[in-house]
Image: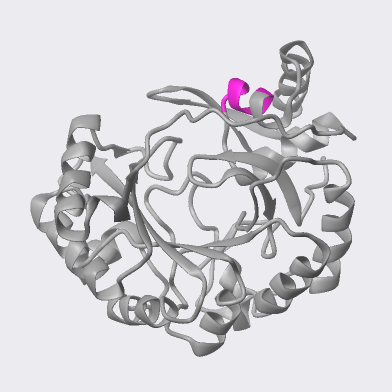
């Protein structure tokens, strides 16, 4: 079985961050205190309640791998803490960010599900970043429970209060809201009532920016589907009216980014490491890692043949996900 690289992956082309080099401080298995219905990594097999249940990587491990990768990759827009689990579950996050900034001028982002934001130590860690992208999919407890399926003890009111407190601590704060529709009666956060509740919550938080988007990769639950383009535009307009157009970004799939200038080591490992963290189409893999299609076909066939990845058919194409 191919060994999973635990820490550095990518760079990944991100709709919001450009060319982003990922740092996974929780993996290799998906470890989270949410089990979101839309998650691109599938169900949370290791669902935890807090940092005490996590044995993450160390600052020293992060710095060793990052220094090596920075020699091979150019044109980065961000270094981003994300990956196979919720990064704030590792309480060394703040120390990691401070040390990363000592070896590079590339801005640092943390993508968080906001679950632990009511903790002062977690806010202190996040405050070391240049940008915090925080998830908020609901403005009411019922929708929050249905979509995010949090571990016991996590409450939406605490998250909203924690995000508001973080907003005055220094880093740029962006709230990302992923809208989902459903083949069932629920869960969905795209109804008029759910959107109004979300707008109310965001007004309390007062972030620098709100991003409105929908599902673009195969979700954990097959009854979850993307919100239509027309409905997403309507939702964005409601946020525009409430928050000001300059504070709302409507994000659609498929932005073009500049090449990263990657110096390859083991291409097969690079493909697998990417798919551990992010299901991708063949075109996305080729674009992200700058691997020629003829080479990529052989790599994908080999990984499929050895059952290290699986093929998933979604509404917008064929994706590959690590097993």
Residue 252 placement, left or right of 306: left
Residue 196 placement, left or right of 49: left
Q: For residue 315, what is the image quadrant?
A: top left
Q: Residue at the location (42% across, 80% down)?
A: 168
In this rendering, is residue 107 above or below 151? above
From the viewer's side, name the closer residue of 77 and 271: 77
Q: Residue at the location (72% across, 40% down)?
A: 75
Q: Residue at the location (29% across, 47% down)?
A: 179
Spot occupied by residue 251 in the image (x, y as percentages of width and height): 37, 40
Residue at far bottom of view:
120
Quadrant of the drawing holding the N terminus: top right
Q: Which residues are magenta?
A: 281-286
Q: For residue 198, what is the image quadrant?
A: bottom left
Residue at far top of view:
294
In this rendering, is residue 213 above or below 152? above
Spot occupied by residue 237 in the image (x, y as percentages of width and height): 17, 45
Q: Main secondary structure of the magenta part?
A: helix
Q: Residue at the location (16% across, 55% down)?
A: 195
């Amino acid at each position: 079985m191919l060994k999973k690289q635990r820490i550095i992956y990518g760079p990944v082309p991100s709709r919001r961050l450009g060319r982003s080099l990922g740092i996974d401080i929780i993996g290799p298995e998906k470890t989270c205190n949410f089990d979101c219905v839309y998650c691109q990594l599938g169900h949370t097999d290791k669902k935890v309640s807090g940092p005490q249940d996590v044995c993450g990587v160390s600052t020293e491990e992060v710095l060793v791998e990052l220094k090596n990768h920075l020699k091979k990759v150019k044109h980065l827009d961000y270094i981003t803490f994300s990956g196979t689990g919720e990064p704030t579950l590792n309480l060394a996050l703040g120390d990691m960010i401070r040390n990363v900034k000592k070896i590079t001028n590339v801005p640092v982002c943390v993508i968080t599900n906001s679950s632990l934001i009511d903790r002062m130590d977690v806010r202190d860690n996040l405050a070391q970043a240049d940008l915090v992208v925080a998830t908020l999919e609901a403005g009411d407890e019922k929708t929050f429970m249905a979509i995010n399926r949090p571990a016991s003890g996590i409450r939406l009111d605490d998250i909203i209060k924690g995000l508001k407190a973080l907003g005055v601590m220094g880093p740029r704060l962006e709230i990302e809201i992923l809208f989902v529709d459903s083949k069932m009666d629920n869960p969905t956060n795209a109804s008029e009532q759910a959107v109004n509740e979300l707008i109310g919550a965001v007004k309390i938080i007062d972030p620098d920016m709100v991003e409105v988007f929908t599902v673009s990769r195969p979700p954990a639950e097959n009854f979850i589907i993307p919100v239509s383009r027309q409905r997403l535009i309507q939702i964005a307009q409601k946020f525009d009216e409430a928050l000001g157009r300059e504070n709302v970004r409507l994000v659609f799939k498929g932005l073009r980014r500049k090449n990263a200038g990657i110096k390859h080591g083991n291409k097969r490992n690079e493909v697998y490491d990417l798919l551990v963290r992010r299901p991708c189409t063949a075109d996305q893999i080729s674009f992200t890692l700058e691997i020629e299609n003829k080479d990529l076909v052989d790599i994908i066939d080999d990984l499929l043949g050895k059952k290290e990845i699986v093929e998933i058919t979604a509404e917008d194409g064929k994706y590959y996900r690590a097993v």
